[in-house]
Image: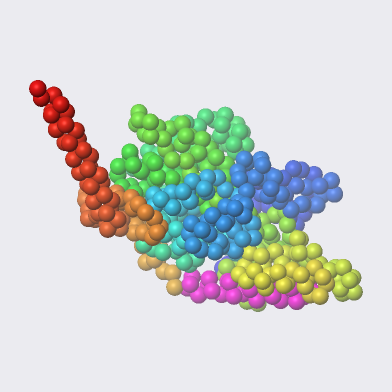
Amino acid sequence: MATNVNAEALKESPIPDAIEKHAASKQTVDPYNVQGEVGEDGVVKAIDYNKLIEEFGTKKIDQALLDRLERVTGKKPHRFLRRGIVFSHRDLELILDRYEKGEPFYLYTGRGPSSDSVHVGHTIPFEFTKWLQDTFDVPLVIMMTDDEKYLFSDKRTIEEVEGYCSNNAKDIIAVGFDPNKTFIFSDFQYMGGAFYKNVVRLSKHITLNQARAIFGFNDSTNIGRIHFGSIQGASSWASSFPHIFGEDESKTVAIPCLIPCAIDQDPYFRMTRDVSARLKYKNSNISYAKPALIHSRFLDALQGPGTKMSASIDESAIFMRDTPNQIKNKINKYAFSGGKVTVEEHREKGGDTNVDVAYQYLRFFLEDDEELERIRVAYESGDMLTGDLKAICIKELQTYVAAFQERRAKVDDEAVKLFMTTRPLKWNGNPRAPIVVPQVQKADGEAAAEGGDGKLTKNQLKKLEKQKQIEAKKAQKAKEKEEKDKAVAQP
Ligand code: TRP
């Protein structure tokens, strides 16, 4: 069955550029195209991520920020951060400020259910999102853009994307998210109410001209595609989720989210940030919180840098359903090698780890920094041959995929139902934060979250007590002053 899905997908989308030669062109990275620059020789170059930081106007995640992240969370940064795989951000500092103070924020990410063929590249942003959830202990919403995948394909039917949606939800759950803190929703199912109001709010503030400039739409683009950005953007506002954050919009509009995503999704949120800054809650001066972002790079196709793994091309990717043998064969047969042509030459000159796919995959999946460094030195010096490097890569990927398959086998329809039910979530935030901001309550009085049961937490009680003392002192002073004034005034 799996092979059929791929055959279908192949019919639908043309073979990507990785395997062909093509005309010289600049690098393109947007939600619908990802390709490195093509030189005069027709060869696709690696994607230049530093250039994207410049073009998009994001910030590089530097060592100082990583140090601060470690200080604030007390946790060693994830290997994706240590190795520049998660490499860029917008306003991550502001999220850390909030975390330090115990002020609320949430995580938002998503997936377009376009096929049942989930590959290792798809799991990267989710792996990282799980780490963020474990680290910050905050709510997470995951949007399944079934509508997007229908609108952006000429062939897919609504029924088809619905099928992908529940299967993809299982794959996402298998990454290991905490059901108490995670809400997964399909656009088709969740649309309406507070969410739809935000979709419309956002769409009212984007002109056709802006949409064209941001996404490259033209006169022949169907209008569903033009509107879709307001749907993906609207989940960046906490007020779209009253069952999690409460009904009081004067409070929820100020709660920001942090969006872990691949860098190609940035245009949606650049647009949303721009509108957030201009939007005010009712006629007050309370602005909508701008979403913060943290961007990851892509996992290269087996064919090498310049393109990303593609779900529709079996030889380009390691799929999460691949057997250990398939993984072995694919790496051995297709993984682009940075090694030299002959053993003699390799021993003499060494291999190029920058382009070697097996080495690059190890940067994504091998946890041990020292081991990775040892491999790099051995390969670049020519001590290690391509075959040995590939063998290490095969073992790591087999372990990674097998662990996923084990968890995936346990995810049933019941689990999907649980994660996708509109319900309150429970989370604790920063255990070391000085202030605990009271959680909101649902309109019917049911607790929306921990501490939202109407009772005050210890910290809140302490704060209240302190406030009382300050007020008592003030009152005492005022009284003294009054008496003094009286005394002076007396004849
Ligand atoms: N458009 C994304 C995709 O095609 C899905 C998505 C929706 C998303 N919201 C998101 C991805 C937020 C990252 C962050 O896969």
* Residue at image location 57% in from the left, 41% down from the top: 267
Q: Is residue 457 left or right of residue 98?
A: left
**Above or below 127: residue 269:** above
Which quarter of the picture shows residue 481? top left
Residue extent of the magenta highlight? 385-409
Q: What residue occupies the far left of the structure in this picture?
A: 491
Q: Nearer the viewer, residue 454 or 407?
A: 454
Q: What residue occupies the far top of the structure in this picture?
A: 491
Which quarter of the picture shows residue 402? bottom right
Is residue 261 in view?
A: no
Is residue 274 in view?
A: yes
Q: What residue occupies the far front of the structure in this picture?
A: 491
**Above or below 59: residue 348:** below
Q: Is residue 154 left or right of residue 348?
A: left
Looking at the image, how many numbered discs can be counted on the residues?
A: 0
* Residue at image location 64% in from the left, 69% down from the top: 369
Q: Is residue 72 left or right of residue 332?
A: left
In the rendered view of the protein, which quadrant contains the C terminus?
Answer: top left
Expressed as whole percent of the image width and height from the top left, the position of residue 431 reads 38, 60
Q: Nearer the viewer, residue 88 or 224?
A: 88
Describe the colour scheme in one phrase. rainbow
Expressed as whole percent of the image width and height from the top left, the position of residue 272 reads 50, 39
Q: Is residue 248 left or right of residue 62?
A: left
* Residue at image location 31% in from the left, 51% down from the top: 439
Q: Nearer the viewer, residue 125 or 12?
A: 125
Expressed as whole percent of the image width and height from the top left, the position of residue 324 reads 63, 76
Query: Is residue 361 shown in magenta?
Result: no
In the rendered view of the protein, which quadrant contains the N terminus?
Answer: bottom right
Question: Magenta: predominant secondary structure element?
Answer: helix
* Residue at image location 57% in from the left, 29% down from the top: 209
Expressed as whole percent of the image width and height from the top left, the position of residue 352 reads 80, 64
Query: Is residue 406 shown in magenta?
Result: yes
